[in-house]
Every structure is written in C-alpha cells, then in structure tokens.
Image: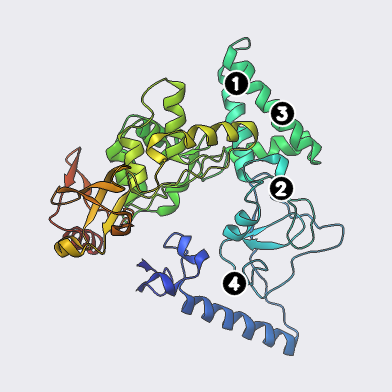
Amino acid sequence: MKICGECGHELDRDCFSNKQWQLPKQKRRCRKCVDKRKASAVARAELETVDGRKEPQPPPAQLTEGDARAESSPEGHNNTDNDEICSICLDVYDKPVQLPCGHSFCEVCLNGWHKKSMFDVQQARNCPVCRHRAKPSKEIISQLHALSIAVTALEEGDEQFDEWKGKQEHLTLSLLKMGHTEDEIVDMVQEYHDSPNLLPNVITEAAGKNDAQTILDWLGSPVDEGKLTFVCLGVTILHIAALRGHKELATLLLQHGAAVDVFDSDGLPPIVRVLMKHVKESRGIVDETVTLLYEWGASLEHHLPGRRGAIVDAFLQALPMFLDKLVRRRCEIINLNQRRDLIGQTCIVEKYIAKKDRYKVTTEHAHETFLVGRDNLKRRDRTPDDPGYYITFEDGECKRHTFASNGECQEFVRSLKSG
C-alpha cells in the first residue's frame, strides 16, 4: 500500500504504474489521477487547436547541473509540445528533464534509457527521439566532482593521489572525446558542487558519528523522502551508515523510506559497498549490517563497469551466504500442512542443509527453529509498513520494539504514521 501524493488515498500496488510506484510520495500519482491529467492535457491541446492559443509552459529542469542553457539540435528539434506527455512512457510528465536538443522526458524514464551510461561514460547514449548528443549523467559528473575533491585534498606523490589523479584524467579525456570542451566540464562540475541535492557537511559528519538526532531533525516530520537520495562524494546517507556499521541508524533510514538498492555514483548499492570494504580491510565478509540490508530485500545488482565490475561479480558469486537465494532472507511460511499454526508467520532462513534438502529456519516472533522444504518458503522482505520489529529514537538512544506478530507490528507503524 502506498499513498497517492495528489488525491491522498492509500492504494494497492495495482493502482499505480511501475514508474509512479517507485516515486516518493510527494510526486507519486495513482492511475486515476494520471488519467485525469492526461484528459486535461488533451482537452487543452484541442482548445489550442481550435482558437490558436498557446499557453506558456514552465521550462523543464536540465538533465544535469552542468549547463542551464537549452541548446537547439541541428535538426531544429526544439521542444514546443504542450501535451505534457513523455514519449518514452506515454504518460504525463513527472519531474521533466530537458536535453540540450530541447526534447523532454520524465526523469525516471530518462534514467532508464541511460541506464548503462549513467555510470559508464563509454556507454553514453543520445536523445531517444533525435539522437542528438546528450549531457553526461549526474552520476558521471558526481564521479568527477568526488575525484576533484580527493585530488585537491592529497599531496602529489601520495600513492592514492596518483591513483585518483589518473582516474580524473581518464574521465576528463573521455568527456573531451564526446565533444565537451574543458570549460563545459569545469562548469558542469561547479554547478554540481552548487547543487541543492548534495548532503550538507553537518549531515555527512552526523552519519559518520552515528548522530541519529541530527539526521532525523534534518529529514523533518513528515520525512522529506527526497533528502534520502542526496549524496556526498557520490554516496547517499544510507551508504555512509552502512559503511560505518551503524545498524540502528541504517534501520531508521530504511523505516523512513530509504531505498535499499540505491546506487552511488560508481553504480554500487550499500550492501556491495560494505562487502567490498570488508575485502579491502581483510575482515569478515559478512556482518550484521550486510544481514540487515539483505533482510530488507537488498540485491547484489551493481553497475560498476569494465574489469572492476567483473572482479566484483566473481567475488560475490564466491560468497557462501549468497549461493542459495533464500539463505539469510526473511520469508513467509506457506503450505506447511503439518503445522498450520505456522502458516503466514515470518522467519529468517538460517542455512540450507543439502543432505536433507531442507532449510533451517527460525520464526521471527516466537523464535522457534525447525526444518522446512523449499516449497514452504516465500520471500517477504522487510518494508517500512511491514518491518517485523521497529526502531525508534527516544531520549538520545535507539529503542527496539518487538511484537508478538506482524499484525501487531503493522498496527504500531500505522499508529505512528497517523499520530
């Protein structure tokens, strides 16, 4: 169930398109509200056709922060359409983004179109309509911004300085080959640096120090979900909390709607970032933070390109924890005829016993341990509405609330939201 940001109704998954379901509440619209907008746009277009009027439209946001100008393409493809329909999803614009050629698309749709090139400048794609050259993604600019800060902070001759300086020069050269000038690159990085969607330094420091109070005050009440996607040096606040091993803080962020599979500017989600950190530090490869993210449905998908991406893939495939897709997941017990009282309850899958072809599971609330078959388990990842337990921050400390059932937990969450 999610709330439509326009009509305010709490509706099932089927009441939203895939695109709208992924949007934060303030921007999310159900199918009925989208249809109303479409009808309004069509009616306005027909009226303009009859009397020749042209109502002024607000200019959509630029694809990246690098250039505030909307250039015209050589073919003259200026975006003068007033129908407010994205040509990728054929839906009403949601947070429209304008390319240099003048064509506009929903930000979510354009991100999907540029999925490969979002993190790899070598895979850059052009406008879906006219194929005119597009600006590099904000993730690419974020990479360059982070490298610029890192190189400035280190002294020449430092081993890490040489590594990061080489990456910076390689990325800059790739942008130059795409046709961007040095001045354009500098301007794009500077505009990104001035972007309001960057994590304030005080919040970055608070995440590192596990200062939940400062972070919760900044997020506001109700929580501004957009702030959960803000980045500092390419990583989100959830990345920082997970990398520092602040399990309770990470749980608070997930309860407030942080996406567990949010990607940093390199294309890595928090769970993969944490695992790679353990490899570099020669520590245990799985800790409580990894387990937490996995129970919340984290996947091992990443978009790290080239040889580095292949190395990460090989590493993840070799981890025992991930050899079976159900181990360490939160699941619901189903089809257990010999114990019908357990059907519908949730459990954590401890391990797979190959000799018996059974899974060892522990129920979430009664903590009862037993063996079940594969057909008795269905994944049921933790969500903000169905977390299984709940963490609150009271009097400067995190407090864990446990419940006798998931229904009791869900009622507790509903009461918090309504109150």
Mark 3 and mark 1 in contact? Answer it, CB < 8 Å: no
Mark 2 / mark 4, whichever is N-terminal: 4
Q: Who's the residue at 50% across and 70% down the image?
A: 17
Mark 1 vs mark 2, foreground winner is 2
Numbered mark located on residue 407 in the image: none
Amino acid on which the number 3 mark rests in the picture: His
Q: CA distance from mark 3 to mark 4?
A: 38 Å
Q: CA distance from mark 3 to mark 1?
A: 17 Å
**Element class at badge 1:** helix
**Residue 344 x/y as whole percent:** 22, 63
**Residue 306 x/y as whole percent:** 65, 35
Mark 3 and mark 4 in contact? Answer it, CB < 8 Å: no
The residue wearing badge 2 is 135
**Residue 84 x/y as whole percent:** 63, 72
Near mark 3 (Cα within 10 A), the count class, few <14, some 14-19 or many ≥20, is: few
The residue wearing badge 3 is 170
**Element class at badge 2:** loop
